[in-house]
Amino acid sequence: MTEQELRAVTGTIFNIQHYCIHDGPGIRTNVFVKGCPLRCLWCANPESQAAYPQLMFQADKCVGCESCVRACPHKAAVLGEDGRVHTDRSKCEGCGECVSVCKLKGREIMGRRVTVGEVFDEVQEDVLFYGSDGGVTITGGEALAHPRFSAALLQLCRMHGIRTAVETCGFVKWEIMKDVLQYCDLVLYDEKHMDSAEHRRCTGQGNELILENLQRINDELSCDIWVRVPTIPGYNDSIENITAVGKFVSEKITRCTEVHLLPFHKLGESKAEQLEWESNGFSSEVPSAEHMEARREIIRSFGLICK
Ligand code: SF4
Ligand code: SF4
């Protein structure tokens, strides 16, 4: 594809973050793609799961003026008996007509359709900060949820000498994964549970495809590999599971240079409320630094670098 054709490819993103230091080496610009095939009980970015723009609503700001009710062309916004507006999510189209009329700024649309060219122009403003290590990381949601968009953005970055990384949950057909990752220097690969039944309980899907894809990246592609485990007390932080991760990576994923255990945090909770989600029954605690370090030591006992 020509540069002009790459710039015209579209996708849906929900954020671009600048000067990031945790999602790949050096200083990076993170592009957050909207859409994810997994439904992790602890999801830190619930606004990323659906692949389309969605309404976020801060109930504590609402004074019940009904401006949004009058503005909504789909009759999705309705004043409740508690004096606040509720959104019938089955009717809401995410059109955003209600956003500007809310003077309390309680309504926001999360997600926008963009061209690769628009995103790349914003990325290019950060080039001076990348140095020899930094670059672009496409994450999400799931970076491969809009594969043509991600592949085109990575390709364009490479054409301009910008280093590229992709964070993926791995639950993607191999043909799609291979087509996108051929343009990336580093993959940040999430592994949530080594036991498939537990993986299904925690994320909605088994782990067979995820482990198989990781193996194929190792064997068939040339990008560097970091394995990342979101570490959720009571769900996947058992000694058995962390040991199984260390054993699998050390024996099979021979090109993995770092394993990262990412401690659970609660930042997703308020966003789930803004999406007006009902509780999924999930409950966990933020692990202590000592607990995380003890789990990292297990990974290190397999001769791996673990952060
Ligand atoms: S416009 Fe804003 S403050 Fe008024 S009812 Fe709607 S959400 Fe509440
Ligand atoms: S985003 Fe559109 S459909 Fe949804 S509540 Fe607002 S105006 Fe209605």
Image (cartoon, rainbow, N blue to C red):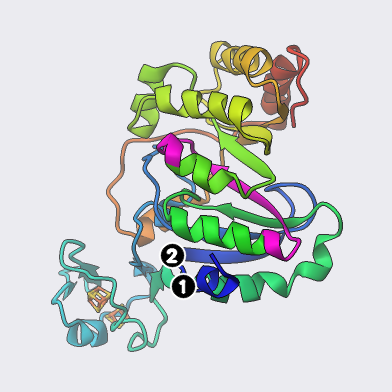
Residue at image x 69%, y 63%?
Answer: 159
Residue at image x 57%, y 13%?
Answer: 244
| Quarter of the rendered structure image containing ligand 1 | bottom left
Amino acid type at circle 2 is Gly
What residue sits right under mark 1 in the picture? 114
The disc placed on residue 208 is none
Q: Quadrant of residue 174?
A: top left
Q: Is residue 58 visible?
A: yes
The span picked out in magenta is: 158-175
Seen from the viewer's position, the closer of residues 135 and 220 is 220
Seen from the viewer's position, the closer of residues 28 and 106 is 28
Q: Is residue 166 magenta?
A: yes
Q: Secondary structure at mark 1?
A: strand
Residues under numbered marks 2 and 1 in contact, where contact means CB atoms less than 8 Å apart: yes
Amino acid type at circle 1 is Val
Q: Earlier in the sequence, mark 2 or mark 1?
A: 2
